[in-house]
Image (spheres, helix red, strand yellow):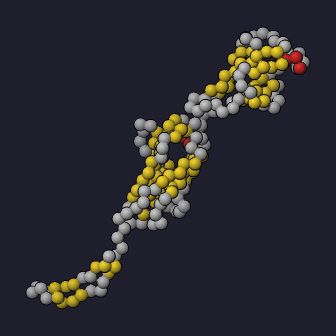
């Protein structure tokens, strides 16, 4: 846009003009996209996408279901990303919001899809060996080892078992254990989930 100032006296006679002043008008800002990398556990990298070249500030926030927006941080240097340590929040469902601001103050924001934060380790427990509670009877031969594996939020991906501190063997429950290859005595079992 170009603006020119003209002065008039009381009779409406032009008494002078000023040079044209060019003005750029920027009332638009592109709505960004959001990339949430590694959303399930630990450190999550948040980055906006599809942002205008004149963006000068990006605000990152998170919200749990039914909660209020909480500031994660502000970045004022391109490429505008932030590392979010999710170990400081409770496990559960969350969304992230990115708000961008350009050099003239226009703002736009986008909210991510809901995703799960799961920092709590899964739990494994040996419940029965040859039909009895572990340690309650002497066993021999080929026995069945029943264990339970659970996680409060996500499915357990893998389970494995270790005998006497040896290598973990991927397996499901029940694990069929051939005790005839071991010497008599006390042995240990450990489940990893």
Q: Quadrant of the N terminus?
A: bottom left
Is 15 drawn above or below residue 175 in the view shown?
below
In the displayed structure, does residue 97 sit left or right of residue 82?
left
In the displayed structure, does residue 177 sit left or right of residue 100?
right
Looking at this view, name the residue that lies furthest to the top.
137
Looking at this view, name the residue that lies furthest to the left.
11
Would residue 177 be visible to someone looking at this image? yes
- For the image, the number of numbered tags is 0
- Residue 6 pos. (x, y %): 21, 84
- Residue 145 pos. (x, y %): 75, 18
- Residue 108 pos. (x, y %): 40, 56
Of 74 and 181, the residue lying toward us: 181
Query: Which quadrant of the figure has residue 22?
Result: bottom left
Is 186 drawn above or below residue 30 in the view shown?
above
Going 50% across and 49% down the picture, which residue do you hit? Answer: 72
Q: Quadrant of the C terminus?
A: top right
Query: Which quadrant of the figure has residue 3?
Result: bottom left
In the displayed structure, does residue 43 sit left or right of residue 134?
left
Going 66% across and 22% down the picture, which residue do you hit? Answer: 148
Of 177 and 73, the residue lying toward us: 177
Going 54% across and 61% down the picture, which residue do you hit? Answer: 79
Going 55% across and 41% down the picture, which residue do you hit? Answer: 88
In the displayed structure, does residue 18 sit left or right of residue 143?
left
Would residue 90 be visible to someone looking at this image? no
- Residue 21 pos. (x, y %): 32, 81
Is 1 drawn above or below residue 155 in the view shown?
below
């Amino acid at each position: 846009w170009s603006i020119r100032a003209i002065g008039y006296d009381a009779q409406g006679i032009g008494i002078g003009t000023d040079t044209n002043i060019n003005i750029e008008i920027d009332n638009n800002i592109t709505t960004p996209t959001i990339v949430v990398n590694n959303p399930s556990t630990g450190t999550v990298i948040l980055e906006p996408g599809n942002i205008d070249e004149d963006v000068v500030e990006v605000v990152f926030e998170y919200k749990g279901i039914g909660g209020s927006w909480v500031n994660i941080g502000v970045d004022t240097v391109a490429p505008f990303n932030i590392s979010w340590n999710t170990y400081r929040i409770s496990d559960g469902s969350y969304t992230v919001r990115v708000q961008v601001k350009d050099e003239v103050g226009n703002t736009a924001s986008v909210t991510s899809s809901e995703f799960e934060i799961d920092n709590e380790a899964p739990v494994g427990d040996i419940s029965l060996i040859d039909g009895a509670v572990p340690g309650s009877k002497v066993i021999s031969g080929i026995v069945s080892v029943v264990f339970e594996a659970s996680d409060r939020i996500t499915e357990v991906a893998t389970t494995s078992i270790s005998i006497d501190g040896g290598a973990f063997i991927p397996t499901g429950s029940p694990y069929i254990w051939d005790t005839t290859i071991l010497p008599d005595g006390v042995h240990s079992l450990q489940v990893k989930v």
